[in-house]
Amino acid sequence: MTTSLRQILTLMAKDLRVEARTRQTLGLVTVLGILIVVVLGLGLGAEAAATRGFGATAVLWVAYLFSGVLCFEKTMAVERADGAMAALMVAPIDRGNIYLAKLLSNLILMAGIAVITPCGVLFFAFDLSIAPGTFVAVMSLAVIGFAAVGTLFAAVVSSTRLQGGLLAMMIFPVTLPLVIASMQLLLHRFRDGQSIGGTGLGVLMAFDAMFLTLSWAVFEWVLEP
Amino acid sequence: MQATLDQPRETTDLKAPAVQIVDLCKSIDERPILRGVDLSINPGESVAILGANGAGKSTLLKILATLTSATAGEARLFGVSLRNAPASLRAKIGLISHQSLLYRDLTARENLQFFAKLYGIPDPATRAINLLSLVGLGDRADDAVKTFSRGMTQRVAIARALVHRPQLLLADEPFAGLDVASVAAVEELFDQLHAAGRTVLVVDHDIERSLRICQRIIVLRGGRVALDKAAGDTSAAEIEAEMSGT
Amino acid sequence: MWQMLKTQSNVAAVYSTATVLAFGAAMGLLLTYTPTETTMGPVQKIFYLHLPVAINTFVSCLLVFIASIGYLASQKTWWDDLAAAAAKTAVQLCAVVLLTGMIWGRGAWGQWWTWSPRLTFSLALFLLYVVYLVVRSSIESRRQRAVIAAVYAIIAFLDVPLVWLSARMMPDIHPGSIQLAPAMKLTLGVWFVPVTMLSLGLTIGRFSLIRRSSDATHVKQSPAPASNSAASRFQIAGGVL
């Protein structure tokens, strides 16, 4: 158990060190996300009654989706550039640990979300004060599930020479339950003032648990050097 | 190259062949690549695998490196079957490819320390610097790999492959794209490996070089073994004939 | 081989005719025998098409799932071909589910589209499998296409219950549960026959088409066996010139 943990931490440290050297992913995620929020804010008229406040959630999801996909692509590209993935596969490590480490690195590098989100909340005048903890918890659970699927698909697609569109297209429909559940949950909580129901949280947690386990299990089967 | 190689970490079961392949078949998309390969390699041998493009050399190496699995047949390393091989078997394998398998944005030292930690080597920092001295890059330890020439990169790649003192080294076209000086340096390293009792399997194109650095020559043609002789018992002409099937 | 092809197209002709006749019979039953539902009127009768198609869509999706697992486990290409055939059927059937659902909605509540649980779910399912087809067409390498499509299909299918659950959270302003009179149940049962025949026919027909065309390319692609004489080498070269 400790060996696995050591391996995962070593892999993560390597990803973060590469990021520290290149400084690409974190910046890209953050800037792209903010740009999307700004463009949609301008286009939708963030102050208009229809979109203000709650419109932020939808806009934020679009921002997360596009910048997240970019993040997953970049962290996988690091392994593909000089074939390092083959070296990881030849090492005496559980290949599922490669997945977990990459997932955790992705989540850390998506920390740019912590900057994008306040922008969205600000531009759309979304009043979080009723239940800020709920907002953070719901969005965090959703983003974890999104990253779980995204990391797997990025690994599978990265062995082809195809670019971004394919990965985004694969991830979006699969993560619809996350988008729907999180938005409905926040709608109930913030607009209707109801407390969080079981179904929504259940969907988020089931999604996370199921896809984390499934991706981790399938990863070994589909990894190509 | 200054320092010498250390002895392998574990002693092998000297009775088991390093590599044993029986009737190995591999098809990709129902196109047969390997059609029944049989061979056995003893520990400490240094073997060259030659063949024309498409003969299945790289595929064979990938199967031995556990990067892909065979469609049929049996392959064993040190007596352990590669089917559902435990992760610990991979601790005995080192892989060199024509790609460097490194992280170009990290320094040579960081790359080697990372792999040392991954393999659970105690004191990764010392190991990294020892290996870099071995391959003659001790003074470039803190430069990013992307600043290295192809020859230097390949030397770091070899250091990476040796970080865990593997008993079996698999090399897929390790000389590709190297200049004359780098080729000489890598050849010397292979000599040292052989002298230290490691088993070495090299896939190569160059017949003369293979005869020079390896003790045994295997030629693959059409997915099968066409020739399997000691280097002293064959000639470049015979090898070439077997490769092209004339 | 020509005999086999002729037999195959004979079987196909007979089957297609039988399916059309079955639809005809079901339609006849619908128009003459089945009572009109009181609240909705004639538009309600689209339900008898909608439900069997929906069930068959799900079965097709399940088939894609099973075939994808089969491919990853065995690496045999015919599993992959089966997945592709079943997926095309699933998409076509799902389009019908969407359209009939929309027609129903228009008839019942005067709107072509609402983000109700059922319609949202149908749309999401449709998108999931359309993406599967687009993914397949984006990748040239046969093996990569098969592996990537298989992974996607497995994830997508397991996603379906979650999509359904989350869609149920959407506001459902017009819940409609239908009480079925015995005559209606009979009609529904009858409609299952032609729809299932169609669905099976589409999948099997497409599958054999894919197999036949991949057999043809397979023959072209096989490398020539290694020849042992210099003379035959020059012959091949001569052929190229």
Image (tube, grey):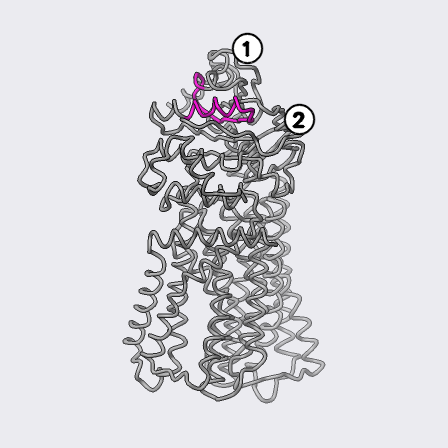
- The structure residue drawn at horizontal position 31% and vertical position 80%, both measured from the top left corner, is A46
Residue B174 falls in which quadrant of the image? top left
What secondary structure is found at the residue carrying circle 2? loop
Residue in front for this viewpoint, A54 or C167 = A54
The answer to whether marks 2 and 1 sit on the same chain is: yes
CB atoms of marks 2 and 1 within 8 Å: no
Residue C134 falls in which quadrant of the image? bottom left
Residue A38 falls in which quadrant of the image? bottom left
Chain part drawn in magenta: B186-209
Residue, disc 1: B233
Q: How many marks?
A: 2
Residue in front for this viewpoint, C30 or A208 = A208
Image coordinates of residue B121 in percent, x first then y, are 53, 42
- The structure residue drawn at horizontal position 67% and vertical position 75%, both measured from the top left corner, is C187
Residue B187 forms part of the magenta stretch:
yes
Question: Above or below — where is B169 with respect to B88?
Answer: above
In the rendered structure, which disc, 2 or 1, sits on the residue that comes first in sequence?
Answer: 2
What secondary structure is found at the residue carrying circle 1? helix
- Which chain does the numbered disc 2 sit on? B
In this rendering, which labeled residue sits more in front, label 2 or label 1?
Answer: 2
Residue, disc 2: B14
- Amino acid type, residue under disc 2 in the picture: Leu
Image coordinates of residue A213 in percent, x first then y, are 59, 60
The reply to whether residue B175 is in sight is: yes
Q: Residues within 10 Å of mark 2 (few under 14, many from 20)?
A: few
Residue in front for this viewpoint, B31 or C222 = B31
The reply to whether residue C84 is in sight is: no
